[in-house]
Amino acid sequence: LVARMRPFGTTIFAEMSALAVRTGAVNLGQGFPDTDGPPEMLAAAAEALRTGQNQYPPGPGIPALRAAVAAHQSRFWGLEYDPDGEIVVTAGATEAVAAAVLALCEPGDEVVCFEPYYDSYAASIALAGAVRRPVTLRPTDDGRYAFDPAALRAVFGPRTRLVLLNSPHNPTGKVFTPAELALVADLCREHDAYAVTDEVYEHLVYTDAESPHVPLATLPGMRERTLRISSAGKTFSCTGWKVGWASGPGALVSAVLRVKQFLTFVNASPLQPAVAVALALGDDYFDGFRADLQARRDQLVGGLTDAGFDVLATQGTYFVTADVTALGGRDGVDFCRSLPERCGVVAVPTQVFYDDVEAGRRLVRFAFCKRPEVLAEAVTRLRRLS
Ligand code: PMP
Ligand code: GLN
């Protein structure tokens, strides 16, 4: 194995899901829903399979999906992209992030990101021979997550090539505020850096969040330097489909496509028309999806609080984080490794998403994208801890 990949072991998600299977624990670790997405989408995929849409699609994705991605961004965010040249379909957001970093970073270039970060970011940056410059999100006294603006300024420098921004943010559930986004945008413009935004949770911002979701590309001067990434997995509860996309100015999208054609060439043809159908669903789908997940969040947050966890606020995503100190925990990794045996539940230690391990030492993440009865069972089990 090449040196730059040696620091990366098995992903925490695979490790924790295997632990759940082995121990029969309730799996609130890896973030995937336990119910299927919209029936219209599933029917469209079945129809595509039956009607011979099973060969290589065009490299950038089928025209109907690119058109649907463009229409969706115009409808929800007022962002206009040309389906011919400004949108590329990828194997999930994961491939889009990897292809973007590989396409834009020379060895030694620096990538600004916020930690805790989604695990594939560090690996993609390492594959490119680039260097990550994380800014730490820390729990605040009022139970949110914030970063020090001076720390963000300090990580920008002459080698900064791009900022990799995930909002709504996994694992913290943070939704970056307009003021925070404005600072990121100012620094990108000042340092002539690109932004790669991971917005896979764009439809999961809860009604009590401090601010709605604001795509960074909508800020002044940002559309021309931003690659906006999203995927069908979260919004349509089909994480196993791995249909994602990147949108941006033609030069950036064609750079991504240049790399992508040698990573996967093209992606799952019968799933593409189905995701196009899903993206065009009515507002009732998107509103209902969010309301549903918000109710599950409230259920799990209430249960974790009753079980004695010190729960941090979550404004979006599938996830809630908690500090385990109040339950006698000293280390999130130890806590999560022993949790199945202690009470039959799996969670993920947030620590593994930090370079500054101390900052996340006692934090753990729970996924609430599960059926209410599953969450109820998990809570019953977690109450045995106190
Ligand atoms: N980014 C974030 C922040 C995620 O949480 C996830 C998946 N859970 C991904 C990217 C990967 O998305 P996909 O499955 O579409 O590759
Ligand atoms: N994004 C999901 C999570 O954060 C899982 C992704 C994965 O398993 N790679 O839990």
Image (cartoon, helix red, strand yellow):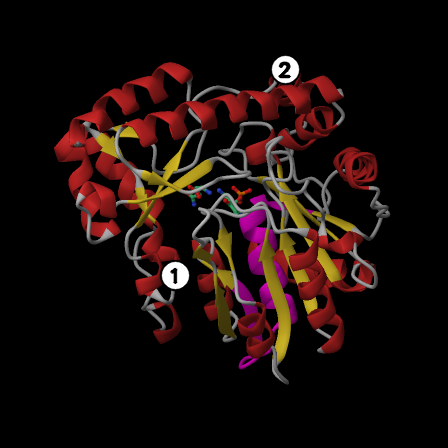
The image quadrant that residue 222 belongs to is: bottom right
Cα–Cα span, label 2 and label 1: 41 Å
Q: Residue at x 34, y 32 (%)?
A: 28
Q: Position of residue 111 (x, y in %)?
A: 56, 71
Q: Which mark is residue 43?
A: 2
Query: What amino acid is found at the position of numbered circle 1 in the picture?
Result: Tyr
Q: Nearer the viewer, mark 2 or mark 1?
A: 1
Residue numbers of the magenta segment: 89-113
Residue toward you, 353 or 90 = 353
Q: Residue at x 82, y 53 (%)?
A: 85
Provide the residue designation for mark 1: 354
Q: Position of residue 112 (x, y in %)?
A: 56, 69
Asked whether the beta carbons under mark 2 and mark 1 sit within 8 Å of each other, the answer is no
Q: Position of residue 258 (x, y in %)?
A: 69, 62
Residue toward you, 93 or 287 = 287
The answer to if 112 sits in the magenta stretch is: yes
